[in-house]
Amino acid sequence: MSRPVTPSQTIGPFFHRALLHEGWSDPAARGAAGERVAIEGRVLDGDGAPVGDAMVEVWQANAAGRYDHPEDRQPEDLQARPLDPNFHGFGRIATDPNGRFRLRTIKPGPVPGVGDAQQAPHINVSIFARGLLKRLVTRIYFPGEPLNETDPLLSALPPARRATLIARAADRGGTERVLLFDIVLQGAGETVFLDV
Amino acid sequence: MSTLLGYRRIAEGIDPPYDHGAYASTHKRAPRRPPIRIAHTLSEITGPHFGAELVGDGVADFTRFAGGEALGERIVVTGRVLDEDGRAVSNALVEIWQANSAGRYAHDADQHDAPLDPHFSGVGRVAAGAAGVYRFVTIKPAAYPWKNHYNAWRPQHIHFSLFGPGFATRLITQMYFPGDPLLEFDPIYSSVPDPAVRERLVCAFDLETTIPGRALGYRFDIVLRGRGATPLERDAEGGVR
C-alpha cells in the first residue's frame, strides 16, 4: 500500500542557525585527494537582484569518481574508483546579503551514467530559499573537460542552455583554481534546473 | 548500472508549484522554464550521510537552553520517517528550527516585535534511529505576522529538514498543528495542490505520546520517496528530457 510522499515547503528566511555547520563550506578541508578548486557565484532572481537568503547544498563524488555511499559499490569499479577516507562529498553554504556564495572543494572524477554512458565530472546542487516552495536542482560542470562533449545531460541541451551548467574559469592568478558559477533563478540566462 | 533502482517520481498534486501566485516571494524566484527530467544515476541515488557527532547524546530537549527553561507550552514531537512503501528510513538526520512561544525567531532577520526568549534557541538536530523513529521535546511555536499581503499571519509551524538515503530523497518541509484557524489563509500551506495531501503536513495530537505533567504529545510521520519497481533503465521519456 503506497503512502503519499510528504510535500515540500519553503525553507523560509530563518534557517541559518539551524542548518549551517562549520566545515560544510569546504568538504575537502580534511586533505582530500584531488585538484583543489574554489567555486564562487551569485544567486540572482528574475530582476537580476541578489538572493541574499538562499542555501546552496552540494553532493559530489571524490577525485576518483566514487560516491561515499553504500550503493556506489559496482564490484568492477572498486579498484579503479577507491573511496577517499578524507572526503565525504557533502557541502552546504548560505548566500550573503549580496547573493554570493563560495565553496571550496575538489574536482570530482567522472561517474557512471545510465547504461554504458560516462558522465562528465559534475557537482550535484540543491538550492533552497524563501520563495522556493521546493528545492531547485542543478549541476556544476567543469570547463575544458573532454567528457563534457559526450555527457548525456549536457549533450542533450542547446548550446546556450548548456553554458549555464558549465562553470567559467576566473582569471585571477594565484595558486588556487577559481571557477565562477552564477545561479539565475528566472528569466534571461536562466540556469538549467533538473527534475530528479 | 542496470541493477540500480531509481526513485519513484513524485505524483502530481503533492509538491507545490514553483510559481504560486498567492505567495509573493515566488514571483521573481520561480524559474520560467520547466525543470528537465533526468534519469536517475549514481549521482541521484547516492547522497550524504552523517555520523552521530552531529547529534547530541540523550533526549533531544530544546526547552532548556543557556542555563534556563524556555517559556511556553512544552510539547513532544515524534514520528517515523518512512518511504512510500511504509518501510522505515533508518538513521535519517532531522534538522529542526522554529519560532519561540511569542512567534519570534532567534535570527537577525526576524524583525517581528515580539520578545526573544534567552532560554530558547529554536534549533536542533535529531537522528531517526534504525526503526526510523525521531523524537524531540520543544516549545509550541506561536503564529506570527509576515508581509506577504495585508494582515498575513503564518500558522504555528516547525521547519523540518531531512536527508533520506539519496540526493533524490532530500526534503525540507514544515509541520503544522491541528485545528489552527490560520491554515486556510496561509499561501505556503495552501501551495500543496491536493487538499488531502496538504493535511499530511498537520501533526496529530496523541495522548499516548504526551508526558504526564510535563508536555503534550504530537505525532508527525514523514514519508520520503520510495524506490522504483523496475530496474533503472532509460527513463520513460528516453533518459535526459
Image (spheres, helix red, strand yellow):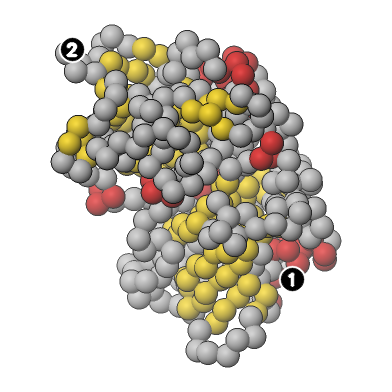
Please tell me which residue lies in front, A163 or A72. Answer: A163
Residue B102 image offset from top left, x and y in percent: 38, 28
Asked which quadrant contains residue A112, the reply is bottom right
The amino acid pointed to by label 2 is Pro
> What residue would you read off at disc 2?
B212
Considering the numbered disc 1 on the image, is that residue within a helix, a strand or a loop?
Answer: helix
What residue is shown at x 40% (from left), y 70% (from top)? A28
Residue A142 image offset from top left, x and y in percent: 63, 72
What residue is shown at x 46% (from left), y 57% (from top)? A92
Considering the numbered disc 2 on the image, is that residue within a helix, a strand or a loop?
Answer: loop
10 Å neighbourhood of mark 1: few (<14), some, or many (≥20)? few
Q: CA distance from mark 1 to mark 2?
A: 64 Å
Against B219, residue B93 (above or below) is: below
Please tell me which residue lies in front, B33 or A108. Answer: B33
Residue A95 image offset from top left, x and y in percent: 54, 58
In the displayed structure image, the side of residue A108 where residue B58 appears, left or right? left
